[in-house]
Image: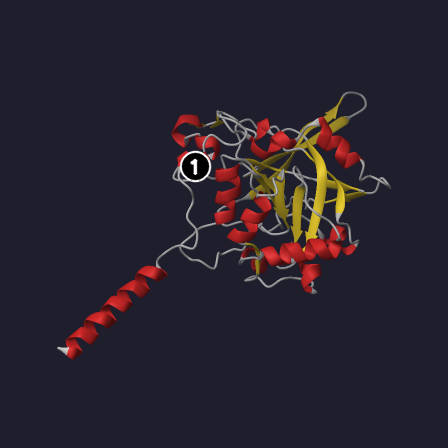
Amino acid sequence: MKHQAMSIAFAATLIASVAGAQTPSWTPPPESARCPSKWGAGDERGSANHMKPASVLNAIKLIKTGEVIELGHVLSSDMPLSPGRTFNMTVKRTAGAQGTNTRTGNEEIITAEMGQVGTQFDGFTHQSQNNVHYNCFKTADIETRSGFTKLGIQNVGMLMTRGVLIDIAGYKGVDMLANTYEVTVADLEGALKKQNVSLQPGDAVIMNTGWGKLWGKDNARYRSGSPGIGVKAGEWLIAKDPMLLGGDTPPVEISPNPDKLISLPIHHLALVIHGVHLLENLKLDELSARGVSEFAFIMQPLKLQGATGSTVAPVAVR
């Protein structure tokens, strides 16, 4: 009987252990807890609502020298692409020896996921929770063959605001974080304190991990996974009410997530739950090398009607 009781106790412990191991570290809130968004029922702009004359005037105050630092990578067939995505450009001649001045012309045909290649800006139709998007727009209600009728990237428009670079790699004293490194709240707080800068509502918050140094040099490694923020750090940043979160990696967040039960939780938190845009694959080497913490951030997505995102070429002006 004693042996049987011990066996039952062991089995119960094992079952509890397995059940515990299968409990995800993060669970998204129900629709009733996230809709309508804080920007109001039917809102399609989310964090882009921060774009107002005040954000422009606040950004202008940071321009002291007029120096422009480009934050976007060049689009080419040599750039790293996420699995399943393509970029093909074919040049064609449009005119040959026209007129007495023998004018000729050329143009190109590009086949690509123009919302999701290169330095890219994620819109709210890019992600959903069981086919329900930001502010509880349902995929079935807004999806058409030629684009989404709601939440399209064309709603964003030009963004100009205070940009803040949080140099996590610099704070940790390394050129590049390991691909399995999860950026924590302590890292964010420590880096901001070291840089003597604080976050304000409406900021473009950009994080440097050093991972961007691999772009075009070791594309296989760049795509293999990347360091980035975890759920706690993501929640902490979103609570600061940013205009966007960006980084020099493909997903901004740590990928793959250490918790194998959840998939890209920062994409879920930012784009679906809180309506905060993500800006990926940024070129931050020059910005971090110069020790720039604050700058005027300027960017405008392509006017792609109903698209899930846009390739972009943002700049920092100081």
Residue closest to the eye, 91 or 186: 186
Q: Quadrant of the N terminus?
A: bottom left
Q: Residue at x 58, y 27 (%)?
A: 155
Q: Nearer the viewer, residue 220 or 131?
A: 131
* Residue sitting farthest toward the bottom: 3
Q: Name which quarter of the figure residue 118 lies in.
A: top right
Residue 275 position, x and y percent, is 53, 36
**Residue furthest toward the left?**
1
* Left or right: 244, with 288 as reference point: left
Instruction: Evaluate whether residue 81 shows in this view.
Output: no
Asked which secondary structure carries label 1, the reply is helix
Residue at (17, 79) in percent of width and height = 3
Outermost residue toward the top?
99
In the depicted structure, whether residue 9 falls above or below residue 179 = below
Please identify the quarter of the rendering in which residue 209 is found.
Answer: bottom right
Q: Count the marks.
A: 1
Q: Position of residue 167 (x, y in %)?
A: 69, 55
Residue 125 appears in the picture as rendered: yes
Work out whether residue 277 or residue 72 is closer to the camera in this orientation and state it.
Answer: 277
Q: Nearer the viewer, residue 217 or 122?
A: 122
**Quadrant of image for the C terminus:** top right
Task: Residue type at mark 1: give it.
Answer: Ala
Q: Residue at x 59, y 47 (%)?
A: 237
Residue 149: x and y in percent read 48, 24
Q: Is residue 157 above or below residue 22?
A: above
Identify the residue position indicated by label 1 in the image. Answer: 33
Instruction: Report x, y in % for residue 233.
Output: 56, 52
